[in-house]
Image: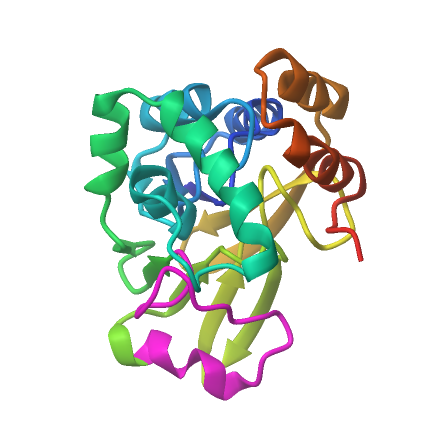
């Protein structure tokens, strides 16, 4: 039995298609989406419909919240808010009322049995917030909120930081899936995680190449806000944000 954990598609249909194809080839029994489906990419509606079709469990991310209600002052750096609001206008304009309602009503966490003895607890960022950043190299104490929110779990998964990692803390496993559509760890390949489930659980990080030229072309073909195109193109091609 295998469970796939993926997160942070950000409207990148080319990357999502490649990951779904890889998942299919790995005989996965359940797919879990940890949020950030549509906002900040050229194919918000298409990605959302594919997630609704193929994913068995879906929780909300901060970008899903933004896609529905907009970006509030103080949630992003002041110098970025005008650009990000233009992108939000694009995203919201490409989502139907039904799609926006779907995003609005998504749960913020998920508990899932992995075996008779093992439980998974998943959130987008932290159990307390869709927006809080716990970076890859944070101290162990930064993850205490996961155990406090769900002490039954053996495995804790989150997305949000676009930087995959794994660590053990007091006998518990912390997994970050990385990002399908906007990796920030220096590799442009789409990132997700497979959990092999038998008497124990084995964590496998997957990196999937995809047609980056298609993703860049989608920015042009869909009329994505021109001022955002150089940034997204750089991330697609480099797997990191410009310094």
Q: How many marks?
A: 0
Question: What residue is shown at x 47% (from left), y 82% (from top)?
Answer: 142
Looking at the magenta stretch, what is its main secondary structure? Answer: loop
User: Does residue 200 appear in this view?
Assistant: no
Furthest toward the top, the residue is 221
User: Does residue 234 appear in this view?
Assistant: yes
Question: What residue is shown at x 36% (from left), y 21% (from top)?
Answer: 49
* Of the pair 103 and 57, the residue shown nearer to us: 103
Is 76 placed above or below 52 here?
below
Residue 83 picture quarter: top right
Quadrant location, the N terminus:
top left
Which x, y percent locates residue 199?
40, 58
In magenta stretch: residue 142? yes
Residue 217 picture quarter: top right
Is 71 placed above or below 136 here?
above
Which x, y percent locates residue 179?
58, 46
Which x, y percent locates residue 29?
38, 34
Residue 122 picture quarter: bottom left
* Of the pair 113 and 193, the residue shown nearer to us: 193
* Of the pair 94 and 172, the residue shown nearer to us: 94
Quadrant location, the C terminus:
bottom right
| Range covered by the magenta-colored residues | 124-147
Which x, y percent locates residue 13?
55, 23
- Colour pattern of the rendering: rainbow
Is 175 placed above or below 15 here?
below
In magenta stretch: residue 232? no
């Amino acid at each position: 039995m295998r469970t796939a954990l993926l997160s942070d598609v950000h409207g990148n249909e080319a990357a999502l298609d490649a990951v779904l194809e890889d998942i299919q080839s790995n005989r996965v029994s359940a797919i879990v989406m940890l949020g950030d489906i549509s906002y900040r990419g050229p194919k918000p509606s298409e990605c959302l419909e594919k997630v609704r079709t193929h994913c068995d469990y879906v929780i909300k991310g901060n970008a899903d919240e933004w896609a529905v209600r907009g970006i509030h002052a103080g949630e992003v750096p002041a110098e970025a808010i005008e650009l990000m609001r233009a992108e939000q206008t694009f995203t919201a304009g490409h989502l139907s009322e039904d799609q926006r309602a779907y995003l609005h009503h998504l749960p913020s966490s998920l508990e899932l049995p992995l075996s008779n003895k093992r439980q998974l607890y998943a959130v987008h960022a932290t159990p307390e917030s869709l927006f809080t950043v716990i970076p890859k190299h944070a101290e162990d104490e930064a993850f205490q909120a996961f155990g406090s929110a769900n002490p039954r779990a053996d495995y804790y998964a989150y997305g949000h930081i676009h930087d995959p990692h794994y660590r053990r803390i007091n006998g518990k496993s912390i997994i970050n899936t990385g990002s399908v559509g906007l990796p920030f760890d220096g590799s442009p390949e789409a990132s997700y995680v497979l959990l092999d489930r038998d008497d124990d659980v084995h964590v496998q990080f997957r990196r999937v190449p995809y047609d980056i030229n298609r993703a860049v072309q989608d920015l042009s073909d869909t009329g994505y806000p021109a001022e955002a195109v150089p940034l997204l193109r750089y991330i697609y091609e480099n797997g990191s944000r410009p310094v």
